[in-house]
Image: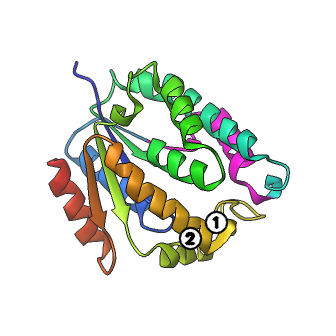
Amino acid sequence: MSKARYIVLEGTEGVGKTTQTVTLVNYLKKQGYSVLQTKEPGTPLSPLTMKLRNIMLNAEYDDQLTVPSREFVSQAIRSIHLEQVIMPALDSHDFIIQDRGILSGLAYGEACGNNFELLAQLSEVISCPLTNNFYELYDDTIYLRGNVLKGLETAINSKQEFEAGDAMEQKGNEFILRVADNMQFMSQSFSNVNEINVDNKDIDVVFNEIIKVLNV
């Protein structure tokens, strides 16, 4: 059996990553493929990572977390996810479709105040069970890019996961603009990145562009 094709969808808040992830998963399943749908940081496929996600992103804990402590929680989530969810799935599925990955981790981690060299070193250590180069962890990266501030507004106005709010969303416009700049620059280092502009496009148009670049 060949290794599953590992695809990640990236982008800032409110650009449609989750919607397109679900749409792609359903599309591939209808073609008869075995597909694993997952996400970072935290996936229902690993309850422990969801508990850690709550600590990392719930605004209730924001004033208690230091800059490095939040990052270490993020890296712990990815380590568990990669070794206990992704690795077993590589030999049992045709596709792995993931909402967010290392690109988001780097972009948000730096904007939160972490040194990029530290982030890269941690990413390398966490990814080493699967690859010697974390930039090549994914077979394909779909980078959805759109109006950053409009996307943040959309995310804030949608149903909130945490009663106290999302810690990243609450950091405001300047923060999310820095994340977007980081993501745009850092995406150039990842293998097989396809950037898709989502502005003024409906869901079906964006999805058709995703299908075209993935050739599935």
What numbered label is drawn on residue 35? none
Q: Is residue 189 above or below residue 183?
A: above
Task: Check disc 1 and report its element: helix, strand or loop.
Answer: helix
Q: Which residues are magenta?
A: 38-59
Crowd class of label 1 (few under 14; some 14 to 19; many from 20; radius 10 Å)? some
Q: Let me know if residue 7 is in the magenta part.
A: no
Q: Is residue 175 above or below residue 193?
A: below
Q: Is residue 165 left or right of residue 158?
A: right
Residue at horizontal 75 percent and vertical 40 percent from the top: 69
Three-letter amino acid code at disc 1? Answer: Glu
Front residue (pair 204, 115): 115
Can residue 47 be seen here? The reply is: no
For the residues bearing labels 2 and 1, Cβ distance under 8 angstroms: yes
Residue at horizontal 59 percent and vertical 42 percent from the top: 42
Which x, y percent locates residue 68? 72, 41
Crowd class of label 2 (few under 14; some 14 to 19; many from 20; radius 10 Å)? some
Residue at horizontal 28 percent and vertical 40 percent from the top: 191
Q: Quadrant of the N terminus?
A: top left
Can residue 168 be seen here? The reply is: yes
- Mark 2 or mark 1, earlier in chain: 2
Q: Is residue 66 above or below residue 84?
A: below
Which x, y percent locates residue 38? 46, 42
Task: Check disc 2 and report its element: helix, strand or loop.
Answer: helix
Query: In front: mark 2 or mark 1?
Result: 1
Q: CA distance from mark 2 to mark 1?
A: 8 Å
Q: Which residue is mark 2?
A: 155
Q: Which residue is mark 1?
A: 169
